[in-house]
Amino acid sequence: MSIINESKPRCNSHPALTLSHAEWQQAVHEGLKQAGEALSALTGTSVRVAEAGESFVPLATFPRLVGPEETLVVAICQEIEGLLPGLALLLLPATSASQLVYGMLGPVLGTEDEEAGGAAPDPAVEPEPISELLADDMALSVLAEVENIVGSSFLNVMADKLEVALIPSPPSVVCDMAGALLETVLASLLSRAGTVADLVPVVHTTFLIGDRNVQAYLIWLSTSHPSLVRRDIP
């Protein structure tokens, strides 16, 4: 499974392009707020972003970010070009990926209960196995567009604060076990940059789409600078 195009040349390191922890928190808040507003405008449905939690995850535990390494996840990935090349990753547990798709496209995709005239499905229950859902082109398009919106909102705020251009690629959707997927991400980054910070900044948030809760992890890893966040500066 290839997530990053390893044939692309590396850019030089730019150690001055970093943020204080407070600036990072502000960028996260602004980016997620813009993403929620854009998703609401796109769907015509209320999309709210619950308070985000930021953490710094040790590399040793990174493959267990969402739980056991065997946990099935969906990752929507965008390569980043510019002075800080790398990868933007929106990571969703499989159940949350289903909730996201049905929260935005439920009336279009339909369910057996709805087609039979029965009650609407319980939003706490996964409506369809993720492997079947990802075979639907419309579902894939929704997941990709969500990352386009969330990733672009986040990166635009970051680019403004760092005063650099950050250019995302079209998103790709990958489904795999969390441990294998995240180890592949780290291996790809190491092959390009030779080093990755010991602590990875991660944003854990919840998107509230109607009655559905979508757990999501937003990760931005740069191959140019091992850590964008200076934790020693308040």
Image (cartoon, rainbow, N blue to C red):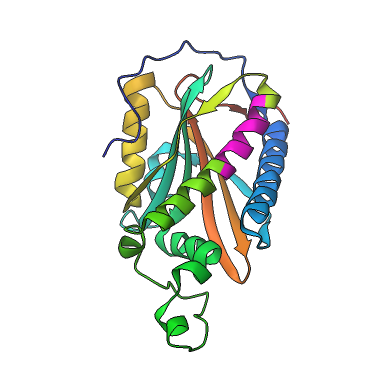
Q: Residue 110: percent from the left, percent from the top?
A: 45, 73
Q: Is residue 190 left or right of residue 33?
A: left
| Quadrant (top left, top right, bottom left, bottom right) of the C terminus | top right
Q: Is residue 32 part of the magenta span, yes or no?
A: no
* Magenta residues, start to end: 149-159
Q: Residue 78: percent from the left, percent from the top?
A: 45, 35
Q: Is residue 69 left or right of residue 38?
A: left
Q: Is residue 50 left or right of residue 184?
A: right
Q: Is residue 155 part of the magenta span, yes or no?
A: yes
Residue 77 occupies quadrant? top left
* 45 relative to 61, above or below: below
Going 42% across and 37% down the picture, which residue do you hit?
59
Residue 130 occupies quadrant? bottom left
Give the mark count: 0
Q: Residue 62: percent from the left, percent from the top?
A: 41, 43
Q: Residue 185: percent from the left, percent from the top?
A: 36, 36
